[in-house]
Amino acid sequence: MGNDLPADPPADPEVLVIGAGFAGLYAIHRLRSLGFAVHGLEAADGVGGTWYWNRYPGARCDSESYYYCYSFSRELEQEWDWTERYPGQAEILAYLEHVADRFDLRRDISFATRVLGARRDEAAGRWVVETDRGTWTCRWLVTAVGCLSSANVPDIPGLDSFAGEWHHTGQWPHEGVDVTGRRVGVVGTGSTGIQAIPVLAAAAGHLTVFQRTANYSIPARNAPLSAAEAAGYKDDYAAIRAIQQASTNGHPFVVSDVDVLALPDDERRALFERAWERGGLRFRAAVRDVLTDPAVNETASEFIRSKIRETVDDAATAEALSPRDHPFATKRPPIDTDYFATYNQENVSLVDVRADPIAAITPDGVRLASGAEHPLDVLVFATGFDALSGPLLRLGIRGTGGVALADAWAEGAATYLGLGVAGFPDLFTITGPGSPSVLTNMPTSIEQHVDWIADLLVHLRAHDLTAEPTPEAQARWAEHVREAADATLLPQAASSWYLGANVPGKPRVFLPYAGGFARYRAMCDAEAQAGYPGLALR
Ligand code: N01
């Protein structure tokens, strides 16, 4: 089905939802089912969000398919068939297109409509939203713009002069990029680079990886889902969802209570070997305290380094690929298919750009500070995103008194519960900064946020109220977010995008809430049950 613009977009809906990915689609569905006049604005010409834009080679989800999906509809759970343990980009996009059709969501979405700004009309008590296709107003503005949708392309001198083609992985051309036999460079070895590098290496004439920070990666162990496995998950959904709701990360697995430091070396090794064989994100749940006890973390970190040494033939390359500057899982841990083994291919080389930084892009390729030249035909920036706050800031939002969100957040993003911002009445931010979001399985967090916002809007509608966080509640939440991060090893990763460290000039504030999904959900529920004491309701 196409994504035609509605012929007559409804004038002045009650709720505007910006974005039509996992969050926006569910928000439109949920709010519509509660009787709100809701409309979606989407810059792309289709649904999908992250999974619309991220079409780079190897793009695949790191959560397993049976739980990287919505839980709000039992029928949807039963009727959709995933084909692999980890769903690829095209399959997730097909799923979201199915959801849009099944719940008839497209009729309430304007596609190819980019938000250019949103300002508060205080007299009218409404938001005025400017788009490249006209102006809208609404009573409640809900952002569903994702956490990782604002591409971070490094400002390297000479990029404009490059004679080859360059692409950021988050803005990958829909027609694909033919790298067959060509000289390809990849900058970045985060989750994205680690997924793309083996796939690019299989086709490229030569692949040069420009690595600034070595990364821990666990084998994904992707495989087709057998009919029996798929049926088993469908039968077990009630239990699976219950575990997710009670979990730290919204994943349906529990963190082991094994004290790895109490184990003899051979048992410790055997335990990690089993977790390595199982693969995936649950490796970090194989023992307790990985993210809180440096000694425990080092056992996991060193095990992974030993696997890199086992896998990579050249000892110097293995050492260069071995992370030493941050503990395992303090940056989002990637999972991979043949990532480290790729460096054994003759057509692949690794360049350490921490030791010898990229100085310039030339018409021919990349020049390092030492003067070394790397000629390239294709340059791929797997350099990540201006995370969490970036997608909101680029909406150009102005709240009470015309204050720009950018100014309100000059010292770093601050929200209440990640859901709203003081000074911005009737604006609600699905998976905003200060929410567990990126530390969790995203669909789980998205559903919780949308349900919470929907309940609040029902309350506001019933009592004819506006709502915004009180400055006091927001300040308390910022402090709690900081304490929750400081109770873990997470802030130790100096170059982490969790801290905004990947974007030059971005304030260093730990952005996601690290206190755990279940605990967070309980706090959100308590806030609602108490009549929203953290919100000024007028
Ligand atoms: O981005 P990243 P990503 N010169 O920021 C390097 C999610 N995700 O797109 O670490 C040289 O993690 C940077 O180096 P450093 C997931 O949450 C999910 O890979 O800053 N290098 C780093 O190596 C993930 O965490 C999935 O020193 C530069 C890399 O680029 C998040 O998205 C798949 C540089 C960026 O890594 C972001 O991952 C993929 C420069 N100027 C991603 N600037 C699935 O679940 C940056 N780097 C499918």
Image (cartoon, rainbow, N blue to C red):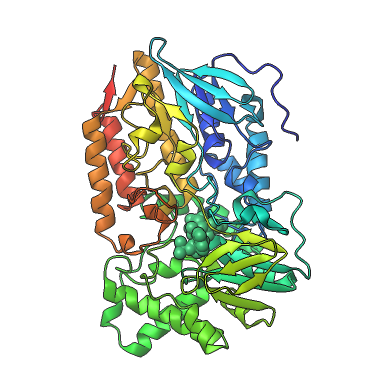
Across and down, in percent, residue 108 comes to: 62, 25
Residue nearest the viewer, comparing 455 with 48: 48
The quarter of the rendered structure image containing the N terminus is: top right
Q: Quadrant of residue 62?
A: bottom right
Across and down, in percent, residue 121 comes to: 42, 15
Across and down, in percent, residue 391 comes to: 49, 40
Q: Quadrant of residue 401?
A: top left
Q: Is residue 520 toward the left or the right of residue 217 in the image?
A: left
Q: Residue furthest front?
A: 371
Q: Quadrant of residue 406?
A: top left
Q: Residue furthest top?
A: 123
Whether residue 220 is visible: no
Position of residue 182 relative to residue 270, above or below, is above
Q: Is residue 202 toward the left or the right of residue 41 in the image?
A: right
At x 36%, y 39%, the residue is 418
Q: Is residue 268 toward the left or the right of residue 154 in the image?
A: left
Residue nearest the viewer, comparing 48 with 433: 433
Position of residue 517 relative to residue 422, above or below, is below
The quarter of the rendered structure image containing the C terminus is: top left
Residue nearest the viewer, comparing 261 with 170: 170
Across and down, in percent, residue 417 comes to: 32, 39
At x 27%, y 31%, the residue is 529
Position of residue 384 relative to residue 274, above or below, is above
Whether residue 43 is visible: yes
Disc tally is 0
Residue nearest the viewer, comparing 96 with 4: 4
